């Protein structure tokens, strides 16, 4: 059956509101001509989407105050509004409007009682009643809540409740204009919420990558077992710029790179590498993830599309077995190896570039959008890029019969034969101290040098085991010491001073104090280490310290007051 058409199905709310004033004026004219009937009012209410009673109220208001005929149904100016003092009260209660209204009610009751009444009881956790703003008349709770929703935006309410970060989630951000490929890259670190087996240790891997903001293609990726460093950035940058196998085909030198305020991104090594290639580094303000939204969206996408499907994903609640597990245990087969995790990340990166179709690209994959862009590319030879992404030692060194000494270690290579005495420079990847690169005084690469007398894998394994055992013993001792230091207090059901628990006998206290001789600062004082000098003659010693003051020592060659020599008769 066909449903009847209502005004709301034909006109929107704004149009119906705009028709109120002409309708009321017409009805007032009919009333003046004494031709107004109830049918006229009923039809007007049906057309405007309101009840007949509402239209009669509009006519009554217009009869008393002709100015209201211009805006029938508009709210009067005496409605309750959230004032700045009430905003401060809402901020004190962290956005809890009910508790803020409770304090306003207590303040109104105190003002109505007058000075003769006893002071009202303080609301637990609230501010003193005399500091609460007085609102007269006091609105009801429903009116107050409605005013909070009307006068405070969703971002302001979220900010009062959860802080500025929650308020930023309700902000509106403008989109940057579209550019061409390699105009701007964004880079960031993202930690995978899972643990992988890296050479016997369970660690959380980090991913460092570069993404083109125009085509959404991931140009370079580096995976680090553990916390990343500038070496991770340089490795990802090298993979992003090179377009030769096994990298590419996307890549080249970008015009701009956006980074956050991470100290590794702003390090001298990364800054020098980008500056040498002619790349403009844009250091974004702190707490502004929306300014590099492309890489932030990529971080969220990899968490939902890849990490959530891998074993060991820690954001999913695991059943509690009641048994305590070792954090460093690696026998659990549920953890991926670092090699397998890296392969999964690289495979997902290839899927993102070649199969994923972001909505902003109009049905194209990121690699298709990158290849369809005719913008010329700037490439750097692999040999030159190799020099850009290494740290320079900063001073010349001499080749000796033991090789090259760097950081109190010797590095040797077979190509050094017959070149002792040559002046060279050292370049190296950060934190990679097993090999270094040797260049001549002009910067030409000579070859790679390896650490001489490097420890065997068995020695390194034994050393790691010894360090682990030492750290475990230290944690046990610190835990025992912390147990002695912790204080327990008795629970209370009424207001009373805190009562300590854990009684000791006199013998137990003396025995423990005897094993700790350095517990008193007086025992550690050395008053005679620096002898005090004699105070000036015009200083007066307080009477309370006179008996504790030592006279200044008399020099051995001092003469008597009458000018004679010392009593021993020696002529000094």
Image (cartoon, helix red, strand yellow):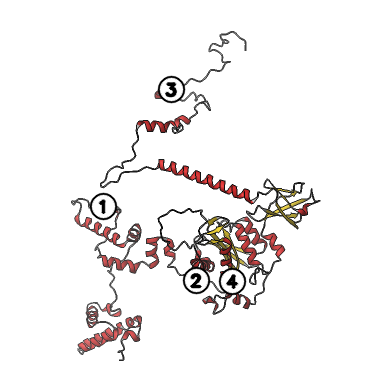
- Does residue 318 lie above or below 251 as drawn? above
Q: SS at mark 2?
A: loop
**Left or right: 485 with respect to 300?**
left
Label placed on residue 548: 3
Q: Are marks 4 and 2 in contact (CB under 8 Å)?
A: no
Measured in 3D between alpha carbons, the distance from the residue under mark 3 to the one under mark 2, in whole angstroms, is 77 Å
- Residue 122's mark? 1
Left or right of 453, for residue 75: left
Q: Quick one: label 3 or label 2, which is nearer the N terminus?
A: 2
Which one is in front, 28 or 157?
A: 157
Residue behind mark 4 = 350
Pointers 3 and 1 in contact (CB under 8 A)? no
Q: Is 522 rendered above or below residue 90?
A: above
Residue at the right extreme of this rendering:
418
Mark 4 or mark 2, earlier in chain: 2
Q: Cα distance, mark 2 to mark 1?
A: 47 Å
Q: Which residue is mark 2?
A: 174
């Amino acid at each position: 059956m066909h449903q009847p058409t209502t005004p709301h199905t034909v006109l929107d709310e704004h149009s119906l509101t705009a028709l109120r004033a002409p309708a009321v004026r017409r009805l007032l004219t009919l009333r003046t001509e004494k031709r107004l009937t109830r049918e006229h009012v009923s039809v007007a209410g049906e057309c405007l989407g309101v009840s007949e009673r509402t239209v009669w109220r509009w006519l009554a208001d217009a009869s008393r105050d002709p100015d209201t005929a211009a805006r029938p149904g508009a709210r009067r100016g005496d409605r309750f509004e959230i004032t700045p003092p009430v905003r401060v009260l809402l901020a004190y209660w962290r956005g809890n409007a009910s508790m803020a209204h409770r304090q306003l009610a207590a303040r109104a009751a105190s003002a109505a009682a007058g000075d003769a009444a006893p002071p009202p009881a303080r609301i637990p956790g609230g501010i003193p009643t005399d500091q609460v703003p007085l609102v007269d008349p006091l609105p009801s709770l429903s009116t107050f809540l409605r005013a909070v929703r009307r006068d405070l935006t969703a971002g302001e309410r979220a900010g009062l409740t959860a802080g500025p970060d929650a308020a930023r989630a309700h902000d509106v951000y403008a989109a940057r204009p579209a550019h061409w490929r390699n105009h701007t890259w964004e880079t960031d670190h993202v930690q995978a919420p899972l643990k992988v087996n890296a050479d016997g240790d369970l660690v959380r891997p980090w991913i460092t990558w570069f993404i083109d903001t125009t085509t959404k293609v991931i140009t370079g990726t580096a995976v680090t077992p553990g916390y990343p460093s500038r070496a991770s950035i340089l490795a990802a940058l090298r993979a992003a710029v090179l377009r030769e196998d096994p990298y590419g085909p996307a890549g080249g030198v970008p015009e701009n790179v956006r980074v956050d305020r991470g100290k590794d991104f702003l390090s001298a090594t990364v800054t020098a590498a980008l500056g040498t290639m002619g790349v403009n580094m844009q250091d974004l303000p702190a707490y502004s993830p929306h300014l590099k939204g492309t890489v932030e969206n990529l971080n969220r996408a990899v968490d939902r599309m890849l990490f959530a499907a891998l074993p060991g994903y820690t954001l999913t609640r695991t059943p509690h077995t009641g048994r305590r597990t070792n954090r460093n245990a690696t026998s659990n087969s549920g953890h991926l190896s670092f090699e397998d995790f890296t392969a999964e990340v690289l495979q997902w990166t290839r899927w993102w570039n070649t199969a994923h179709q972001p909505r902003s690209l109009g049905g194209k994959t990121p690699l298709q959008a990158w290849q369809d862009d005719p913008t010329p590319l700037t490439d750097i030879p692999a040999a030159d890029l190799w020099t850009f992404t290494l740290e320079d030692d900063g001073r010349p060194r001499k080749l000796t019969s033991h090789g090259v000494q760097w950081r109190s270690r010797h590095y040797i290579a077979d190509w050094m034969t017959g070149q002792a005495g040559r002046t060279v420079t050292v370049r190296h990847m950060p934190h990679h101290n097993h090999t270094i690169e040797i260049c001549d005084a002009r910067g030409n690469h000579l070859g790679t040098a390896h650490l001489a007398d490097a420890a065997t894998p068995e020695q390194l394994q034994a050393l790691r085991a010894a360090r682990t055992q030492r750290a475990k013993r230290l944690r046990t001792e610190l835990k025992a010491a912390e147990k002695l230091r912790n204080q327990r207090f008795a629970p209370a059901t009424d207001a009373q001073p805190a009562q300590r628990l854990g009684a000791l006998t006199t013998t137990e206290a003396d025995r423990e104090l005897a094993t700790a001789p350095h517990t008193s600062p007086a025992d550690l004082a050395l008053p005679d280490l620096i002898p005090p000098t004699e105070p000036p003659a015009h200083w007066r010693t307080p009477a309370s310290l006179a008996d504790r003051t030592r006279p200044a020592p008399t020099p051995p060659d001092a003469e008597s007051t009458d000018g004679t020599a010392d009593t021993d008769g020696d002529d000094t």
